């Protein structure tokens, strides 16, 4: 059973930074492709960043150049470094495992989410 637990969310002002963490059970991070998604109130869950089993990253256009996805296999943890945060980045952020790039419906495993709020 794959378990994913996110942390690191919070409230920041526009232009600030946060680092999200996703602690995974077993050897999930090295075994599966991983991704971060986000969902703002009243909107659909959208892909933010993904990383393949070989470590190749992929980003949504809206976060390219600002967000970085990376993993620590020894700690079995996935990270999302978020810089230059903007109010439109406000959302619940979810960690996901086992899917294909940023295609939401291909991911079978999800965490409970961590809230990120960016004020102007």
Image (cartoon, rainbow, N blue to C red):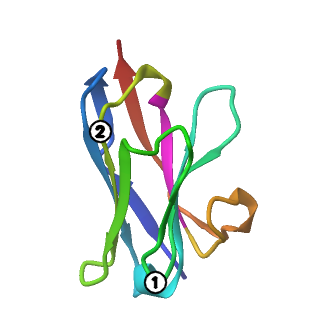
Question: On the image, numbered disc 1 is attached to which residue?
Answer: 54
Label disc, if present, on residue 79 of the rendered structure: none
The CA span between labels 1 and 2 is 24 Å
Q: Does residue 112 show up?
A: no
**Position in image of residue 10 (x %, y %):** 30, 34
Quick one: label 1 or label 2, which is nearer the N terminus? 1
Residue sitting nearer the eye, 120 or 107: 120
Q: Is residue 92 magenta?
A: yes
**Position in image of residue 40 (x %, y %):** 58, 31
Residue drawn at x 46%, y 73% as measured from the top left: 56
Mark 1 crowd level (few <14, some 14–19, many ≥20, 10 Å Cα): few
**Position in image of residue 14 (x %, y %):** 31, 20
Quadrant containing the C terminus in the rendered view: top left
Q: Residue furthest front?
A: 65
**Position in image of residue 87 (x %, y %):** 43, 21
Residue sitting nearer the eye, 56 or 30: 56
What secondary structure is the magenta-colored segment mainly? Answer: strand
Q: Which residues are magenta?
A: 89-96
Label disc, if present, on residue 83 of the rendered structure: 2
């Amino acid at each position: 059973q794959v378990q994913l637990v996110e942390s690191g969310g919070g409230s920041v002002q526009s232009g600030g930074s946060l680092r999200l963490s996703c602690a995974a059970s077993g050897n999930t991070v090295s075994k599966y492709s991983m991704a971060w998604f986000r969902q703002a109130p009243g909107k659909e869950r959208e892909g933010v960043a993904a990383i393949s089993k070989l470590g190749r990253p992929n980003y949504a256009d809206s976060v390219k150049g600002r967000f970085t996805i990376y993993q620590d296999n020894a700690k079995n943890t996935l990270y999302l470094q978020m810089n230059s945060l903007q109010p439109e980045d406000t959302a619940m952020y979810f960690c996901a495992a086992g899917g294909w790039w940023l295609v939401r419906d291909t991911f079978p495993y999800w965490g409970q989410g961590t809230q990120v709020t960016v004020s102007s």
